[in-house]
Amino acid sequence: MSIVKMKRLRLIGFSEQKDRLLQDLLHLGCVEITEPGDKASDPDWTQLVHRDSSSFSQRKAEAAALNSAMTTLKKHAPKKKGLFRKRVELSSADFFDDSIKAQALEIAETVNNCTREISRIYSSENKLNASLAALLPWADLSLPLEQQSTAQTELVLGTSPAGTDAAALEAALRPVTDLAELSCISGDAEQNYYLLIVHKSAYEAVLSTLRPLSFGVVRFKGLTGTAQENIDRLRKELDALEECRTAQEELIAANGPHMALLERTSDRVTQELNREAVSERFLSDGRIFFAEGWIPANRVEDLTILLKNYVCAWESADPTEEETPPTLLKNPKWMECINMVTEMYSLPAYNGIDPNPLYFFWYVFFFGFMFADVAYGLIILTISILVTKLVKPKKTMGRMFQLGIWLGASTAICGIFMGGFFGNALEVIYQTFVPGGLAAMPAWMVKFCSGLLVNPISDPMTALILSIAIGCVHLIMGQCIHIYMGFRGGAKSGLDALLDVVPWWILFAGIGVVAVLGTPLGLIAGVVALVATQGRHAKGFGRKLFGGIKSLYDVTSWLSDVLSYARLMALMLATSVIAQVFNTIGALPGSIIAFALVFIIGHGFNIGVNLIGTYVHAARLQYLEYFSKFYIEGGVPFRPLQYDTKYVDIKSEEETTL
């Protein structure tokens, strides 16, 4: 239960063995290869070696092709899936089967070709539909579109806004010439469509007269035959394109059963992509390579066994003071789920302390204390166990449900002491639906409903005092950890940590003595201790004294920290009150069916809303009140080359052998 000690790793080997080594390191899963840093620009190094090139771009293209194909299949060949899916287990040999990869890439290429063809078809359809829309108003025109004149006349197709009728246009033409005829072909909500026949001698004059009236000339370049003939042709082309598009979509749907194969191969290509990204951090001259990185000290022996299969030179050494090793937390498997809460804040610095064992039970207890309902806890516990055992989710989702087991158990246990079972559902059920009412309740149930420790509804003040008392213990433990960390750094820093904390203990003990006995001696001793110690790092007596006096103002900060724990009571009360409200509403009609309906909806809502709020506030009390007393943040996460799959699990060699 600590921060894992790291070793700086340096490795030199033959380039011809690099790919096989990277594959073995991927399987080993405990080595992080870092960027070469200054060596990549150091003249002494660049004369000998350079940044190694890899097949990164090729792997990236394969990943893009697979992801694109899977996206298309999800759209055109959707497969019903539950909220969770069980991951397939594969051996390393099956996972990296080249024939499977080739088959998957071929399927992806087929699907992507269909997608590109569908995209081309849509583009063609858009163009044809635009042409069709332009021709439809001229469907009644029997004149061939390519005929724009005769020996003596000009034939002009034109449009005008719907607000301008043919009579207005004809009235404008009469003073100009009687050698023109305007015929309205059709009209819609936006425009009117005309055929203008005008003698060539009056052509320019007629157009000059009509243009101010928003008359626009329309020409169909490249089209022959009547408008209706072109409309029929376009519709046939659109029908043919639709048939082609349907065929492509059917071909995509036919590849739907191969989704699992694509997902599996996507996972493989992702591993290869990660491997190639690491490969680019190597320095090489084509014959030999150099790499450096980090490895946990407890895995050096495993690496030693692996590297016996290679012709190479390597060393592992403790990090120097100038280096910042990555942070890896090592906890029992049952406690690893709390990592998700820690990582939401920040990893501890490498020279800090692992907070997980120090706040795991606090976090679980705070959550249960705020939820405090036996039924709610059993629901959370049951769902978490079922999902964990049956679905076996990984990564963040897996940690969430593993943590849910602890949180559900804590909620149920705290609910026993707070008298919560779907709020006050037992009392409402007896009072509304059981003959004899509350008098018929067994004695043990009456005792339970009243709260073995405290009932937040009937006695909120006691719940508040209990919350504040728990918060004080929480803060004092944080200060004790601060003292421990001080002595871990040496006697001088340990003394500093004592002087940071003990005067405050004297002050608060003095406040308690004043409240109980009425004597101010303890309080005076605490004030003197603070004034004498809290400005000790300042230079000069005056500054030391001023720093000590100024520290007394921090009493308000401590008061704020203590009062923050009132949220323990507040959220417990909120959960209970909302549950009670829904129970009361459900009982109003006096119908067991109505009660059951309101009961299910209401309590489902209460669990969902308060689950999020309780999770956040339990974390907040750790982050702001607890961590502020001892936590050194800013750790860099340890990112080894290892399997990072989304759809499948890779069996270990031991599992494969069995």
Image (cartoon, rainbow, N blue to C red):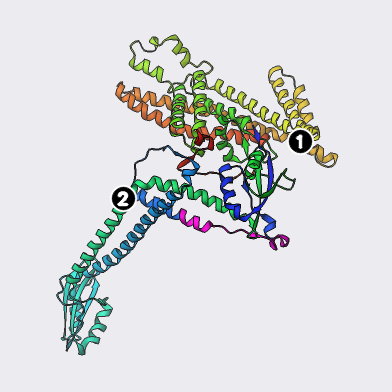
User: Magenta includes 522?
Assistant: no
Say if 324 sits above or below 404 in the image: below
Numbered disc 1: secondary structure: loop
The amino acid beneath tag 1 is Gly
56 or 537: nearer the viewer: 56
Q: Which residue is mark 2?
A: 254
Tell me if 442 is positioned left or right of 53 in this view: left
Residue 489's label in the rendered image is 1
Magenta part of the chain: 42-63
| Between 119 and 6, the one nearer to me in the picture | 6
Circle 2: is it few (<14), some (14-19), or many (20+) Cα within 10 Å? some
Q: Residues within 10 Å of mark 1 (few under 14, many from 20)?
A: few
User: Nearest the camera: 130 or 339?
Assistant: 339
Q: Is residue 634 visible?
A: no
Residue 479, image x, y percentages? 69, 30
Q: Which label sits on residue 561?
A: none
Q: Position of residue 579 (x, y in %)?
A: 42, 26
Residue 164 as seen in the image, left or right of residue 482: left
Instruction: Name, please, the residue furthest toward the right.
Output: 541
Q: How far is the residue under mark 1 from the one under mark 2?
A: 66 Å
The x, y position of residue 97, in whole percent, is: 46, 47
Q: Quadrant of residue 379?
A: top left
**Earlier residue among tags 1 and 2:** 2
Among the 4 quarters of the image, the one containing residue 638: top right
Q: Is residue 46 magenta?
A: yes
The amino acid type, in three-letter code, at marker 2 is: Ala
Q: Position of residue 657 (x, y in %)?
A: 51, 35
| Mark 2: secondary structure | helix
Locate residue 488: give its quadrant.
Answer: top right
Q: At 69% from the left edge and 32% from the top edge, which residue is drawn?
A: 555
Can residue 4 be seen here? The reply is yes
Against 405, residue 118 (above or below) is below
